[in-house]
Image (cartoon, helix red, strand yellow):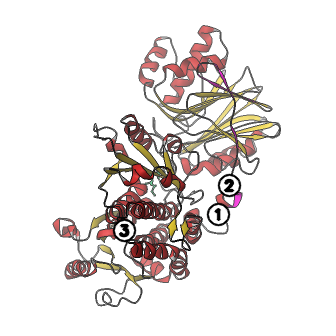
């Protein structure tokens, strides 16, 4: 949710910032801007994607070795040139970029209006930069001190980076609730919302914590808390390769990430699945095994695709571990005075580890004494920091806004967690445990097989690309897959889609069915198969356009439709990990055939750091 990039050092700042903003564009892309110091502060901003800013700035003299840049996902005020960041203070001394939301901006704005301040935008950011400016003017203090004073009054979440005309060699940055990483080069520093724009310059980074303030020059990094005490920066080595954040010959990141799944699933299993000793090794689970196996209840908190992984986990954990599970939308859980009892364990699932709804929900549960177990992809992310224990999904950076490889990695990790708890709790037989280990082990090869021939998916995409609406149906373990398929289609193609339990469909949504409605059944062989076939009959009788994801070799559905996608046979607990892959591809091909930007769908952002 907004990408931040700043540079101070010996290079020209603009090319570094522009390249970095392109890497961060997945975080927001409705407008962008840069500010640099060349005698005075110069700000350039443009509505639209970073490419439009680049075109706008083509041929302009942008000489400076210090600068800040921002790519925006609008919260306060529509996407426009004037609402784009950076924002200048009325005095013209400071420019600021911001990721997050200042919740009490309205009262601060009132104070500033009464002092004669004028605002050119609808943003909370412009209020904050002027609030800092006002403190600076009235207290004759340093900018660093003014920022500290201002942030003590601010309610909300932020990363801010400021450029100061009177100190043209220094950047000031601060964070609370939104991510900020500083890359340490030789005589240069890079500030960014994540490490992806930094990796090509340096692998040495410092992750800034909440309520910390950084004062950064080309050859100096000072960290302080809001009480003005110095903190020793904790320098870490990035474990990330440039190839992981480039398209690598694919047309889109989304397609690249779909095709990476054999590898990401393998990486997720590696070192954990111990077939030889018939065991699963997961340090995070083992460290909390008593609490996990004796949990009265597991509450899963997540949003979007991660919530769908949580729903699948509910079925798996209840089946294997016999522990009651509730799956909560993070945004609802936080605000409804939830009951969290002693002995409850919270699973927080998040690809980015920065989702504000999830973060605040688990902070609330933590206050109530619950154990927080994170299932996360991004090492060192905000949710990782507040979790007591957890397991990483090792899916690597996911750049496409639509989550694909992160989802399958979440399912794999959650299945392994459930199996490990079940083994320790002895709620699963040894034979069943070993059978599922082998099923997991076979996954990368089966995913390869799905990806090796996508012709049936492409042909269904071509036939349905102009549909107005889609219905996705599945039962049992395949119900979350239906929900995820529908979400993917909505995000990427802007076609309305609903996911429903296949049998529940007859209690309402069946009214939508006519010869124009594609109805996709996730109908692989499992305990519900016959019932699902009956549900297909019901749609067939009403002339819905049936599409089915079936187990290879299953001919029972050929009588209803030619639009069949076959996937390799798998145990019903494991099958969702395979079954979702054709649905990811279907959305992708439909989105592409509609001429849409599948990596950056409208209105979305990869990392939703506002509530
Ligand atoms: O980073 P998170 O997993 O916490 O993100 C949660 C949702 O915002 C995310 O899954 C969203 O639904 C994706 N765009 C799905 O493709």
Q: Are marks 1 and 2 in contact (CB under 8 Å)?
A: no
- Provide residue 360's location: percent of width, then percent of height: 42, 38
N-terminal label among 3 and 2 = 2
The mark found on residue 247 in the picture is: 1
Give me the C-alpha separation between circle 3 and circle 2.
37 Å
Q: Mark 2: few, some, or many residues within 10 Å (few <14, many ≥20)?
A: some
- Provide residue 331's location: percent of width, then percent of height: 36, 43
Q: Are marks 3 and 2 in contact (CB under 8 Å)?
A: no
Q: Is residue 493 visible?
A: no
Q: What residue is pinned by disc 3?
A: 428
Q: Pick whichever, 241 or 349, lies toward us.
A: 349
- Provide residue 367's location: percent of width, then percent of height: 39, 34
435 drawn magenta: no
Q: Residue at x 30, y 74 (%)?
A: 519
Give me the C-alpha separation between circle 1 and circle 3.
42 Å
Specify the quadrant of the image occupied by residue 459: bottom left
Residue found at the very far top of the displayed protein: 139
Q: Are marks 1 and 3 in contact (CB under 8 Å)?
A: no
Give me the C-alpha separation between circle 1 and circle 2.
15 Å
Marks 1 and 2: which is nearer the front?
Answer: 2
The mark found on residue 274 in the picture is: none
Secondary element type, mark 2: loop
230 drawn magenta: yes
Q: Pick whichever, 288 or 125, lies toward us.
A: 288
Q: Which residues are magenta?
A: 221-243
Q: What residue is pinned by disc 2?
A: 240
Secondary element type, mark 1: loop
Specify the quadrant of the image occupied by residue 314: bottom left
Split into 4 quadrants, where in the image is the C terminus? top left
């Amino acid at each position: 949710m907004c990408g931040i990039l700043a540079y101070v050092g010996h290079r020209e700042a603009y090319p570094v910032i522009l390249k970095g903003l392109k890497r961060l564009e997945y975080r927001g892309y409705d407008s962008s801007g840069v500010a640099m110091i060349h005698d005075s502060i110069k700000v350039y901003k443009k509505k639209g994607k970073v490419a439009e800013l680049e075109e706008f700035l083509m041929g302009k003299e942008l000489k400076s070795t210090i600068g800040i840049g921002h790519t925006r996902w609008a919260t306060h005020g529509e996407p426009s040139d004037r609402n784009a960041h950076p924002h200048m203070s009325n005095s013209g001394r400071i420019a600021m970029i911001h990721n997050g939301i200042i919740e009490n901006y309205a009262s601060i704005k009132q104070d500033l209006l009464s002092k004669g301040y004028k605002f050119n935008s609808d943003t909370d950011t412009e209020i904050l930069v002027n609030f800092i400016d006002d403190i600076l003017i009235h207290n004759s203090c340093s900018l660093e001190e003014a920022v500290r004073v201002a942030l003590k009054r601010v309610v909300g979440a932020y990363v801010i980076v400021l450029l100061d005309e009177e100190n043209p060699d220094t950047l000031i940055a601060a964070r609370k609730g939104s991510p900020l990483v500083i890359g340490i080069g030789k005589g240069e520093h890079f500030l960014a919302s994540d490490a992806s724009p930094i990796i090509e310059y340096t692998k040495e980074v410092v992750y800034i914590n909440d309520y910390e303030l950084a004062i950064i020059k080309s050859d100096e990094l000072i960290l302080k808390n809001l009480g003005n005490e110095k903190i020793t920066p904790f320098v870490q080595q990035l474990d990330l390769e440039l190839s992981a954040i480039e398209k690598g010959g694919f047309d889109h990141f989304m397609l690249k990430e779909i095709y990476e799944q054999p590898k990401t699933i393998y990486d997720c299993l590696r070192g954990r699945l111990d077939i030889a000793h018939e065991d699963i090794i997961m340090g995070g689970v083992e460290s909390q095994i008593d609490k996990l196996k004796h949990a009265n209840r597991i509450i899963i908190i997540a949003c979007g695709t991660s919530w769908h992984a949580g729903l699948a986990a509910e079925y798996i954990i209840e089946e294997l571990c016999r522990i009651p599970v509730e799956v909560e939308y993070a945004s609802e859980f936080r605000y409804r005075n939830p009951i969290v009892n002693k002995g409850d364990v919270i699973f927080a699932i998040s690809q980015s580890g920065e989702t504000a709804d999830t973060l605040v929900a688990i902070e609330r549960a933590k206050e109530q004494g619950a154990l927080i177990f994170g299932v996360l992809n991004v090492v060192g992310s905000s949710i990782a920091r507040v979790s007591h224990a957890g397991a990483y999904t090792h899916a690597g950076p996911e750049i496409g806004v639509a989550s694909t490889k992160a989802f399958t990695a979440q399912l794999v990790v959650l299945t392994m967690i459930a199996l490990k708890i079940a083994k320790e709790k002895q709620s699963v037989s040894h034979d069943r445990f070993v059978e599922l280990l082998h099923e997991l082990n076979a996954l990368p090869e089966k995913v390869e097989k799905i990806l090796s021939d996508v012709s049936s998916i492409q042909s269904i995409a071509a036939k349905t690309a102009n549909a107005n609406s889609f219905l996705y149906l599945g039962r049992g373990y395949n119900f979350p897959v239906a929900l995820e398929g529908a979400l993917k289609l909505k995000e990427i193609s802007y076609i309305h889609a609903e996911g429903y339990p296949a049998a529940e469909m007859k209690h309402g949504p069946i009214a939508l069915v006519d010869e124009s409605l594609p109805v996709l059944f996730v109908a692989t062989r499992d305990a519900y198969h016959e019932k699902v076939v009956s549900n297909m009959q019901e749609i067939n009788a009403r002339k819905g356009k049936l599409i089915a994801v079936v187990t290879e070799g299953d001919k029972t559905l050929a009588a209803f439709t030619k639009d069949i996608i076959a996937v390799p046979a798998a145990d019903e607990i494991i099958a969702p990990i395979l079954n979702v892959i054709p649905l990811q591809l279907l959305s992708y091909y439909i989105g592409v055939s509609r001429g849409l930007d599948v990596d950056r769908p409208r209105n979305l952002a990869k990392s939703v750091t506002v509530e």
